[in-house]
Image: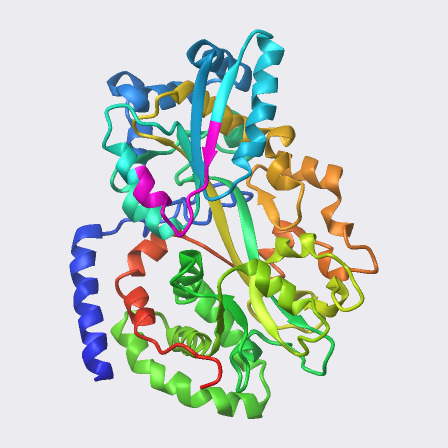
Amino acid sequence: MRKKILSTVMAISLVATAFTGCNGAAKDTSAPANNNDPANSSSDAKDDKKADTAELTGIDAIIAEAETMTMEELAKKAIEESNGKTFYGVGNSSRGKSALPSFIEYLQTIDPNYTLEFEWQQPKNNKIFEQLTSDSLKTEGTFAMTLIQDGNQIQTKMVDTDILKTYIPKEWAEANNTTPDSYEGFLPLQTLNKVFMYNNTGSAKYTNCWDFVYEGSHPLYMGVDSEIVGKNFLMMLTQDKYSDWLKEAYDALDDTKKAYFEPTIKEMQADAADLGLGANGAYALAWIKLWVNNYNEQTDDGPICNTLVDASATDQSGLLVYSKLRSVEESASVSVKNINVAAYQDGYKGIGGYGYCHYLFLTKNSPLPWTACAFIAYISCTEKGFEPWGKDMGGYSSNPTVAKDIETTFQHSTGGGSDFPAKNDRGYDWWTTTGELVLEDPAYCAEVAFSVGSWIDVLDHYTPGE
């Protein structure tokens, strides 16, 4: 029966491949080292950027022109376009609502008489894709722009269908040592990280990423069906770079633990071959299988954090958004002191967590495209614009200049001091090197969604008490 299911998965994958071709397979070797978008995803929009601007029309022509303009030049165009009007934005982050008043204040430094009403929506339950798709059917849309996550669905449902348009601000490109024309990929506002943590009030030690899938371990985790970026994380593990990391971490285990995992790894060899994975693909599939078979599904990262920091959660672990530690209210039984960030511990081996982006786009039928470009430039290129996101740990600006300014202002690297070391954020560069953060690649996720993704869909899930 298992082989029958896998055969069906592979058949679907072949059909999907016929449609997607080599989409996203190539990486942009000219992309800046500081670029927080590991995907550098290919799309039709990239071809537009390379076309003669004179041949472009509508929103594409506006974006091409905007990419040659400074922040102040964009601001003047925005004032001319939207003075006295209403700006509608939609996003996975509610903080767009917090950034808009500051943006308006900036425009008022140029024209004191400028006014703008605004509404920012944050759809729940992954409805943002349906909302944007529906809005795209109008001649002129309601939403001017979006701040959106889940690289896989963005690639397949939004970019490949031409519903969303990428705009690269001139100053953002310069800060990343590139140009809007040469940059290939989506525009990330920030990278967020979900990291492995565990309650330290007991005797359990998590010194290796394989410990989180070892016998008896049931980490707290948002289900892959309720937050799709979690499924993207699992799919990313099958990319050669990350399956190699898993193999290296496995090699560091003692013989007892190796003996526990070895049967599952051997069992996955055939599936790895059928799915076309690399030399260490079986290690990735084994880890994924054991993770899905054993994680304790939760509805949100907030409750996961609240559980782990309680003294009563002895030896429990989880994979959750790092920034949730910011809102812990200290008490006699609840404290950030009760939690360890696994990757921060001496001698820890393997993957420390997962990084995914919030991406910025214009809609193809944006009613206020110049204002949208100006707002996108403002929040991605200025410290004040990024502050609603940057004021908290665990959210890293894709603009290295802004990231440096944010750290200078908020001192996240020492935010916990000696009392709360888990809150001393070591930053994007540390997490993506020493911390072995798995980074979402929208193109890769889209490429394997019908093969690895469908394989994940048929795995058994853990049910507490059974």
Q: Is residue 415 above or below residue 353?
A: above
Name the residue at 49% across, 62% down. Answer: 299
**Residue 339 found in image quarter:** bottom right
Left or right of 261 on screen, residue 127: left
**Residue 456 found in image quarter:** bottom left
Of the pair 127 and 174, the residue shown nearer to us:
127
Visible residue check, residue 59? yes
Of the pair 45 and 340, the residue shown nearer to us:
340
Query: Residue 318: x and y, percent?
Result: 57, 69
Query: Residue 357: x and y, percent?
Result: 48, 47
* Residue extent of the magenta highlight: 119-132
Of the pair 308 and 293, the residue shown nearer to us:
308
**Residue 372 found in image quarter:** top left
Query: Residue 104: x and y, percent?
Result: 56, 20
Queried whether the magenta region covers residue 131, the answer comes back as: yes
Left or right of 397 on screen, residue 74: left
Q: Is residue 318 above or below residue 322?
A: below
Queried whether the magenta region covers residue 436, the answer comes back as: no
